[in-house]
Image (spheres, grey):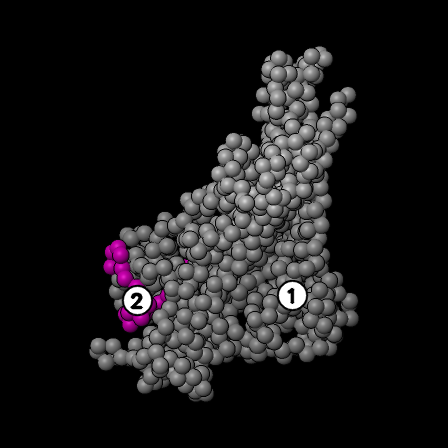
Amino acid sequence: MKYLPLILKNSLRNRKRTSLTVASIAVSFCLLGFLLAMYRVLFFGNDPTPAQALRLLTHHRVSLAQPMPASYEDKIAKVPGVKSVTEWQWFGGVYKDARDTRNFFMRMAAEPSKLFTILSELQIPDRQKETFQHDRIGCIAAKSLADRQGWKLGQRITIMGDIFPVNLELTLDGIFDTPEHMEMLVFNRDYLREGLPPSAKDVVSSYLVQAETPQDVPLAARAIDNMFDNSPAPTKSETERAFQLSFVSFLGNLKLFLMAICGAVTFTILLVSGNTLSMAVRERVREIGILKTLGFTSGTILGIILGEAGVVAVGGGVLGCALAVLMCGMLRNAVVGVQFLKILRVTPEIAAITLAVALFTGIVSALLPAVRAARTPILTSLRYTG
Amino acid sequence: MAIPIAYNLRNLVVRKTTTVMTALGIGLTVAVLVADLALVNGLKQAFQSTGNPLQILVLRKGGTAELSSAMSREVYQDLKTNPGIARDAGGQPMASLEMVAVISLAGIDSPNGMSISLRGLDPVGRQLHNARVVDGRWFQAGRREIVVGRSVSKRYPQARVGKQIRFGKGLWQVVGVMDAGQSAFNSEIWGDLNQIASDFNRQDTASSVLLRAVDAAAVPALVNSLNDDRRLNVAAIPEQTYYDNQTNAGAPLQILGTFVSIIMAVGSSFAAMNTMFAAVSRRAMEIGTLRVLGFSRFSILTSFFFESLLLAAAGGLAGCLLALPLNGMTTGVGNFTTFSEIAFNFQVTPAVMLPGVLFALILGAVGGLLPARSAARQEILVALREG
């Protein structure tokens, strides 16, 4: 520790080089932190809220695009451990112009009477809730969505059907807030049912199920899936998290891509930091010889050089983390319509991992030049004219 | 007078550790960019080589995808009589009624199951899609038999000739593997229209109709006449346009890749700058000597700038080499139009490597400019004294 001033002095000797190295490493660590944050939201997500921990999504085993009979609802409601269940129908459709991504948001049909107990995290004034529950053509929308579209209460919203041959003429009855910032619009499933031809009435894309207790969740999921196992429409019941993961796998082999890029970035950091340090050591061969004549042991010299590498790398790591925090914040605000980016955040764990990688790469990259410097005999280094 | 290039080359060789490390750093950045471009290139290729310029896809009015479209048999019968449609050797109109659904299969990348497009069609459809069987045989009408696309058979162990797959109302026998060139159909499973329709309870309404126009001139007329026919109530689009529009399935990966490589480039250009500054300060005496010999400030500036470009070019080439093993590797992404997976190959072509090398050169230029300027600015006496 008493060598810290010497280490700092050494690292500040060539300011241009040190600042360029720190900048280069910081940019790489910023990227690493960002990629780790991305990895977290994609594959771990936020911890489920108490309301989420009680919920299951039941859909056709093969894919969301295949419907289940409407009669499943009553059957699911009778499964032990199930408290409540509502139809949760993906409507798709087109709002204004589908080519503009700002017009993309989730449009779901559900049962207004059960919706608010199952999605208990929705915050909505009681008056608006009641209006919606008694309005056949009513709908409610997330606050972020309503703000973006400039919708006011009572607004008429027209959505053209594509999967369903129905055009919806909805009235905005309420605006709700959710912790997840879900951009969605929910309307009455009875209204959808009315417009459908008899042959298409009996289709439900998914059910939202609420269990009595968190312990009932896996049991209820298995009971529901077993019940429909041998029917023409077998089901798959999973938690929202698991469902989201299967959606992520749809984007391609992201896990592998992210890992490969993280690997490439880390390796680049190693190269940059190793390069700088070996340049620094090469310049100081004579000086190290003098230090040795003054009585510094090889071990101390090794430590001083490794320490310098560590200081530079951790400096870059800290700066990089700060940049990553800034970048995640900017993305959260700038991107609309991409749900998972709304929870993109550099958590303390991610910052800790990034700094650990910083320390590790700093020391590993310095190992070779440091050992060489420590081992060079005094006479050789004093004679060196570099 | 310019300083010979050999001077720069030798300098890079003498300091080989530093050169290699810097070039590798640039190389990794370029490799990420090239890999990203190769992925998008492969995906584009898969969609762009799908579809025949003479063919038109007909969906329900307002429909944008086969999966969400519905087409009744009556409409199909009406459609077929349009005089703009080509006829085959037997005098039958070349129009194919098809049903598209999605099934789930466990694959190598996705043990929990990935969605695959299933297409039911008649023999006329096989002819229109220009697919041929490379292993086994075609499915027979009236039997529970299927033929799988080449990419599907490669990526899904269950989908091999002789095996059975469960979907719809029971088991289906895999009897063949088909090849439809580099097209999207290699990611599909095909079977007999009537059999598949009955398994999905869709005997009355299939999904879409594919038809071939008499000649290229007839295509726009046919599209217009179908779109304007109030009685049919359909939307007709050229087949190639339909598939071109699906290229955006790769957009999330493309955006991520470009974003990452640009940020990496910023880091790498700092590193290149570092290396060049070190080169300049180490060679102060040399620079002084060169000036004494009569080389101008400008030729020293260009010489160092050029050395930085050389270094970056080496990095760019290294990056291309690093990305080259990806060529031909198969991967898949979800396609939101079909709600199923499209498989394609990474394509590391010269058209992809060129932007990679250019990217490296830009990087080298940014990193080399300041050090080169500082080299050119040195005073002769100071430089000579410094060594």
Residue B145 in view (yes/no): yes
Q: Which residues are magenta?
A: B114-137
Q: Quadrant of the C terminus of chain B?
A: top right
B248 vs B103, left or right, is right
Element assignment for label 2: loop
Circle 1: is it few (<14), some (14-19), or many (20+) Cα within 10 Å?
Answer: some
Instruction: Please state the chain letter of the residue tagged with numbered disc 1 in the rendered image.
Output: A
Q: Amino acid at mark 1?
A: Met
Whether A137 is drawn above or below A280: the answer is: below
The residue labelled by disc 1 is A184
Element assignment for label 1: strand
B190 vs A8, left or right, is left
Instruction: Please state the chain letter of the residue tagged with numbered disc 2 in the rendered image.
Output: B
Relative image position of residue B108 (x, y in whole percent):
42, 47
The residue depicted at 64 percent of the width and 42 percent of the height is B376
Relative image position of residue A46 (x, y in whole percent):
66, 49
